[in-house]
């Protein structure tokens, strides 16, 4: 259990006695003590009493024996709390002895579907796919570590009218040549060539439209060629996922085509429930509370006027399958912020239809854009979208050169390993360390810096700790009792105890910049400890205690980075 939770549990009954009902003790870190409680100030306003008087009464009734060495009312009504060394040492020792570092498996495991990445067949992944893929991967890692059953849903764009022109272009090239083009990953060139012919050639347009009809009606040859396009595209996507070091596999692809048979039943069910309305020939649902800019009710169009189905119908079918078929009680859609209203409408309609039963929640995990150093959307020099594979290649190349320059003692294999870990880690961390609701600037120099809130800084902190143990020789078993003889040791011990709190919070809010921020604080606190407190040169009891702190810090850094999808090299 972490210190904030322990202190809150001790203070809560005392504040409740003063208030006559439950009160959040509002415990947080303090510059004037280890922690402080801010609860007396708002409670005093509610009771019409002096804040210091309320704080003193609560403090007098709190059982802090064995936990706090000092507790006092400060300032306008804060309660300052200094943790006893014995309590702090016991907590850290217990954390060190726990393989899970004090983070328990959830006592209420759920089935969670995480919908993320979602590239389109016959189109290359670009920088716009980075955030969804990286945030979604971090979500799946953390939720699985907490003991939830996680279903990865890579909602592949593998259906629709463009496939008519793509299949016709494939036939024009010949299967062998088309496969050669697609197998080298040049999907954009294939798509653009098909698009150019569609725009310029009326005959090609007509053949493409006829091919769409053939595909939708299940024509054998057309379906075989469509599957060829899908197979070549997914093979390319998997290569990019391997570059990015994420956990998505071939088994996680959930193509839009897989919901085709579910679309008509979704519309029929909405009609049976009396939710369907016809507007300008389209079948719509008008959930309450949604209006357009003109003030008129806003619809979710589930079937278009021409009888076709669009994204809303597919998203409803997928949601219905995930809650009804997979038994999911939490649905996460890791999609950019511009889609917020769309998902709000989908979730509202699903709730009206009973497809989001009580206790089941659907969440849009939105995110902002990636900008260039000019403050505009990140583009290549030619003005095109930046291809994700090329960006990752450049990241690894830059980091490899950095590793070779900073540590000439590494052999070629070690340089390659460090280059990949640091390069890919830098790209991921720059994303995850930013509030996902905000845009961020993609800056090579900043993200690859060994100083500041960057992946290389955290990776270097981990590698430095590992170097201590390489020099230490045989290390005795961890000290049974932590000895805190210096303020820097206390600061590090207190920071370590916050890991479980951060993981628990991020499990709920999926704001990974809080986990990144915690790891950065831990690394900087360790740096202060390392500069002030000799480890290997200390006398045996103190040496063993400090080695325990070093080892625990390394384990927390490694696990925290792993949850973010970032590797921690042993040497840098």
Image (tube, rainbow, N blue to C red):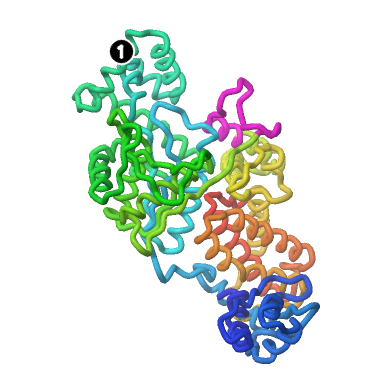
In terms of secondary structure, where does tag 1 sit? helix
Could you tell me what secondary structure mostly forms the magenta stretch?
A: loop
Return the x and y of residue 267 as percentages of the image width and height: 27, 42
Return the x and y of residue 460 as percentages of the image width and height: 67, 51
Identify the magenta region.
372-396
Q: What residue is at 38 percent from the left and 8 percent from the top?
A: 201
For residue 527, above or below residue 189: below
Closer-to-camera residue (463/293): 293
Q: Is residue 544 visible?
A: no
The magenta stretch spans residue 380? yes
Q: Which residue is mark 1?
A: 206
Closer-to-camera residue (519/125): 125
Closer-to-camera residue (556/337): 337
Would you say 223 lies left or right of 322 here? left
Indicate the quadrant containing the N terminus: top left, top right, bottom left or bottom right.
Answer: bottom right
Q: What residue is at 70 percent from the left and 78 percent from the top?
A: 45
Return the x and y of residue 474 as percentages of the image width and height: 61, 67
Return the x and y of residue 97 as percentages of the image width and height: 54, 74
Residue at the limit of the structure toward the front, as seen here: 295
Would you say 7 lies left or right of 489 here? left
Q: Is residue 110 visible?
A: yes
Q: What residue is at 52 percent from the left and 45 percent from the top?
A: 134
Q: What residue is at 61 percent from the left and 61 percent from the top?
A: 554
Q: How many marks?
A: 1
The magenta stretch spans residue 478? no
């Amino acid at each position: 259990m972490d210190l904030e939770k322990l202190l809150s549990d001790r203070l809560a009954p005392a504040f409740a006695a003063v208030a006559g009902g439950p009160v959040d003790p509002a415990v947080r870190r303090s510059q004037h003590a280890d922690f402080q409680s801010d609860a007396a100030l708002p409670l005093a306003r509610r009771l019409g009493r002096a804040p210091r008087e309320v704080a003193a009464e609560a403090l007098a009734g709190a059982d802090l024996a064995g936990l706090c060495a000092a507790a006092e009312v400060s300032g306008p009504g804060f309660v300052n709390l200094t943790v006893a060394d014995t309590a702090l040492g016991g907590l850290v020792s217990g954390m060190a002895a726990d393989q899970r570092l004090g983070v328990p498996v959830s006592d209420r495991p759920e089935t969670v579907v995480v919908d993320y990445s979602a590239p389109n067949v016959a189109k290359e992944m670009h920088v716009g796919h980075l955030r969804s893929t990286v945030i979604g991967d971090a979500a799946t890692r953390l939720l699985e570590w907490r003991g939830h059953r996680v279903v990865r849903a890579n909602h592949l764009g593998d259906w629709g009218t463009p496939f008519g022109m793509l299949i016709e272009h494939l036939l024009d090239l010949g299967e062998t040549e088309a496969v050669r083009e697609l197998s080298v990953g040049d999907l954009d060139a294939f798509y653009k060539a098909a698009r150019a012919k569609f725009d310029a050639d009326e005959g090609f347009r007509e053949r493409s439209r006829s091919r769409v009809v053939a595909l939708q009606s299940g024509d054998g040859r057309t379906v075989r060629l469509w599957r060829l396009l899908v197979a070549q595209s997914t093979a390319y996507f998997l290569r990019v996922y391997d570059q990015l070091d994420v956990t998505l596999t071939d088994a996680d692809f959930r193509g839009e085509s897989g919901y085709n048979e579910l679309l008509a039943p979704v519309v029929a069910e909405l009609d049976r429930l009396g939710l369907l309305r016809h507007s300008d020939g389209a079948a719509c649902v008008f959930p309450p509370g949604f209006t357009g800019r003109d003030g008129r009710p806003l619809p979710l169009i589930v079937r278009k006027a021409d009888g076709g189905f669009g994204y809303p119908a597919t998203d409803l079918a997928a949601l219905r399958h995930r809650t009804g078929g997979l038994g999911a009680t939490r649905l996460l859609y890791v999609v950019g912020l511009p889609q917020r209203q769309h998902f709000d409408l989908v979730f509202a309609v699903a709730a009206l239809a009973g497809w989001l039963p009580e206790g089941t929640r659907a969440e849009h995990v939105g995110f902002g854009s990636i900008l260039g150093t000019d403050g505009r959307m990140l583009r290549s020099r030619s003005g095109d979208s930046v291809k994700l594979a090329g960006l990752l290649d450049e990241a690894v190349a830059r980091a490899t050169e950095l590793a070779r320059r900073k540590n000439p003692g590494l052999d070629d294999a070690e340089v390659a390993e460090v280059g990949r870990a640091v390069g890919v880690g830098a790209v991921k961390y720059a994303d995850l360390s930013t509030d996902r609701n905000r845009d961020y600037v993609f800056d090579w120099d900043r993200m690859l810096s060994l100083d500041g809130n960057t992946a290389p800084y955290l990776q270097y902190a981990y590698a430095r700790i590992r170097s201590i143990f390489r020099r230490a020789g045989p290390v005795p078993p961890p000290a049974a009792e932590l000895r805190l003889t210096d303020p820097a040791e206390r600061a590090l011990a207190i920071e370590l105890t916050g890991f479980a709190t951060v993981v628990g919070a991020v499990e709920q809010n999926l704001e990974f910049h809080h986990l990144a921020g915690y790891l950065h604080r831990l690394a900087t606190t360790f740096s202060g400890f390392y500069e002030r407190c000799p480890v290997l040169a200390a006398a045996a009891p103190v040496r063993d205690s400090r080695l325990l702190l070093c080892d625990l810090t390394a384990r927390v850094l490694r696990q925290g980075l792993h949850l973010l999808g970032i590797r921690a090299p042993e040497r840098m």
